[in-house]
Image (cartoon, coloured by chain):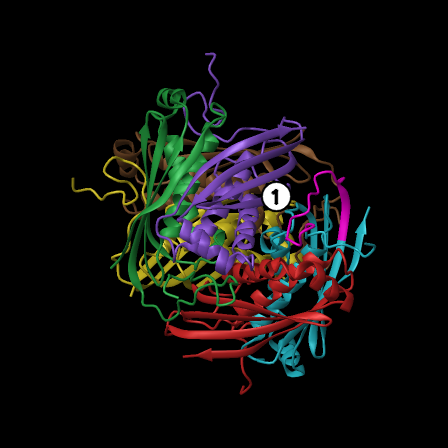
Chain colours: A cyan, B red, C green, D purple, E yellow, F brown
Amino acid sequence: MSSPEFSHLDAAGRARMVDVTAKADSVRTAVAEGRLTCAPETITQLRAQALPKGDVLTVAKIAGIQAAKSTGTLIPLCHPLALSAIDVEFAVEPDGIAIRATVRTTGKTGVEMEALTAVSVAALTIYDMCKAVDKGMSIGGISVVEKRKE
Amino acid sequence: MSSPEFSHLDAAGRARMVDVTAKADSVRTAVAEGRLTCAPETITQLRAQALPKGDVLTVAKIAGIQAAKSTGTLIPLCHPLALSAIDVEFAVEPDGIAIRATVRTTGKTGVEMEALTAVSVAALTIYDMCKAVDKGMSIGGISVVEKRKE
Amino acid sequence: MSSPEFSHLDAAGRARMVDVTAKADSVRTAVAEGRLTCAPETITQLRAQALPKGDVLTVAKIAGIQAAKSTGTLIPLCHPLALSAIDVEFAVEPDGIAIRATVRTTGKTGVEMEALTAVSVAALTIYDMCKAVDKGMSIGGISVVEKRKE
Amino acid sequence: MSSPEFSHLDAAGRARMVDVTAKADSVRTAVAEGRLTCAPETITQLRAQALPKGDVLTVAKIAGIQAAKSTGTLIPLCHPLALSAIDVEFAVEPDGIAIRATVRTTGKTGVEMEALTAVSVAALTIYDMCKAVDKGMSIGGISVVEKRKE
Amino acid sequence: MSSPEFSHLDAAGRARMVDVTAKADSVRTAVAEGRLTCAPETITQLRAQALPKGDVLTVAKIAGIQAAKSTGTLIPLCHPLALSAIDVEFAVEPDGIAIRATVRTTGKTGVEMEALTAVSVAALTIYDMCKAVDKGMSIGGISVVEKRKE
Amino acid sequence: MSSPEFSHLDAAGRARMVDVTAKADSVRTAVAEGRLTCAPETITQLRAQALPKGDVLTVAKIAGIQAAKSTGTLIPLCHPLALSAIDVEFAVEPDGIAIRATVRTTGKTGVEMEALTAVSVAALTIYDMCKAVDKGMSIGGISVVEKRKE
């Protein structure tokens, strides 16, 4: 069969963890993005009351960093990886907040799941802090925008 | 000021955990949804090789349930809650998989963050298992669809 | 059908977490036992070098207590419970060590999984500390010996 | 003294973590086995209601994989290891379920504790899902069947 | 003997977890304090480069809150508690930073360990962020300043 | 500017995790110390009732070892590290207990935070076990006494 195969499924269609023992350690980088969409009034209110102090985005950044470190616990078939760099950045827009996470490791597997997890949990953390003022928020556009092996 | 206030910010705009000590224990339910969007070929391939065994969705369900339990660890300003029920359901569609999580507790705060976390991590888990065959997937539409206090 | 039913399976045979929201809080106790079987020489050597200081059994006891607390994380369909008492006791025998764990909570579900988990991890911890001197150990007889609701 | 020594005890008989700093990284594999023993009727009922969907064994497999990853947290004197492969297999027998876990790493210490932990927690997870229909189950025969360094 | 007794030791002097099953749920509050002592130049430099943005203290606050939630995992004989409020405050002084944590729960045991843990981990987090500029810092004065049951 | 810089702050004063990807793996050792200060009567009573069995210090040692392993989870901007050795030692003095932790790894960053965390949590654990007999204890003098790269 010429189509790509699900690496996490064995020949019988059962879930499995991929054996990466024989893979070489490489420097691997992944970048993921996502977005929390909210009412423009929520952004206005954030700019007035919360963003000057910076806490909302700092709390979300820390949550994203911590989540990236625990990806191997959260995602069952992921391998645990010792991450060497995690960054989470935010862009405040008129009706939402864009989130971008960059993760690096020297290891045997890529780190796109770690970057996606950082974005997801950072978004959930902002959602948590804003949910008292906005009941209609949603999180979306979570995808990998770069993956690199050196 | 008559607009709603950020419960997680104090008067100075600094992040804080809300003090829920005086709140009554109520039965609280929250339902959240989200969606992994992928290529139609990925769904076709999943239907042929993975879905008959059921493992992909069962692994994602377990990951979502476990994540809901650890919401208080993942989201910094969330209160830890003893959840009394967590369910994660999936609907396989032609170009994606819809995810719906229902969480219940008897406690002092709502459980929408737990439901959103279950959906997010279940989606990430499917992403992880399909990423070898589809590099263009995205996760979105993560939102609360129901919140109830009895 | 009159036979008992798997509470963790829905009508379609799919795994699920039981919804215990409507259950009353009761005082619940469970006792579990298990045994590490080893060579008589290992026990002799433990008695000579390790048991006087007590560390081996204290380390195993702490590991069992900590594992009981994390049962809701280890066993996917278990509910998280706030345990009010955990005890782990040992009886050193000529060719092994018997382990007994007692767990209590005031909650909506029984604590036999917590007691079984405490026994299992205490046994694994002793195994770990003795494996340099005995390659033929085994762990067995892990079962619930008492379950009580007040 | 010519008998083997407890690596986890110092000269005074006190528990310690072994210093493996100077050990070389090697590819290490360990295989462990164990068994959940239950009533034949439980197996009959599992075959009728649960095994066709596969969820019971998939949930147990995921629990075993996740437990293997957290061995360094569960077993106090174990070193944390970045596992490169974890597999958990099951054989359904007339009066029980045999469990076999294989774990691999490239690291400084062996992985038999990780394999034993995977077997133990997979067995506990099946126990949890069957305990509503069978009060007399037990877990045993947990032992290492292979340990290899390449 | 009329002197107070170690609640965590049984009659034989062995460590144990206290059985709190029969205790009533009360509202419990504890306040703990501590201090990171550093060179005055470090404070000057923090004021110039770090404190305006607020991140250093926000990161430390989040770390303290998260640590308080995991006290039952960190301190072996502590009971897990569902905390209803955690606050961590800082006072920047000429040669150090004072830290004060307040923790509340409705439960069966006091929360002084949770408050002490929050202070300790908040202090360690500041230490971590300042260690590149100051090799001579120390953490001290960690003690309980208030404990209340309502 | 010639003064040393906060490695955990970017040019704008925002917190960040340091990117250590390009650093070489070295053998790194750190030693930290700290002290629990208590009433002389508490030490007298510990010597009479608790220290002969050794459990108090063994429980604290295990807690310190486990905490060192989880430093990357506790301290937000720390990198996760696979520690190759952790030791925690105690000296019982007339009015307190001195604690000393030694941690080693082969990795890209130093392990002083791991040693400081081990000392802090070991001290908190002794505090927990003695708090029923002594309400006036304090923890202090937590500092790094040695840091080495080979």
- Residue type marked 1: Ile
Say which chain tag 1 marks.
D
Q: Quadrant of residue B121?
A: bottom right
- Examine the residues drawn in magenta and state their main secondary structure: loop
Q: Residue at x 30, y 40 (%)?
A: F39
Q: Which residues are magenta?
A: A10-29
Residue A56 appears anywhere in the view:
no
Q: Residue at x 26, y 34 (%)?
A: F49
Residue A114 appears anywhere in the view:
yes
The answer to whether residue F83 is left or right of residue E111 is right
Residue projecting furthest to the bottom: B2
Q: Is residue E1 above or below residue A79?
A: above
Q: Position of residue B22 (x, y in %)?
A: 37, 72
Q: Position of residue A83 (x, y in %)?
A: 68, 48
Q: Is residue B91 above or below residue D144?
A: below
Q: Quadrant of residue A141?
A: bottom right
Q: Quadrant of residue F80?
A: top right
The front one of C34 and A105 is C34
The front one of B103 and D135 is D135
The answer to whether residue C7 is left or right of residue A4 is left
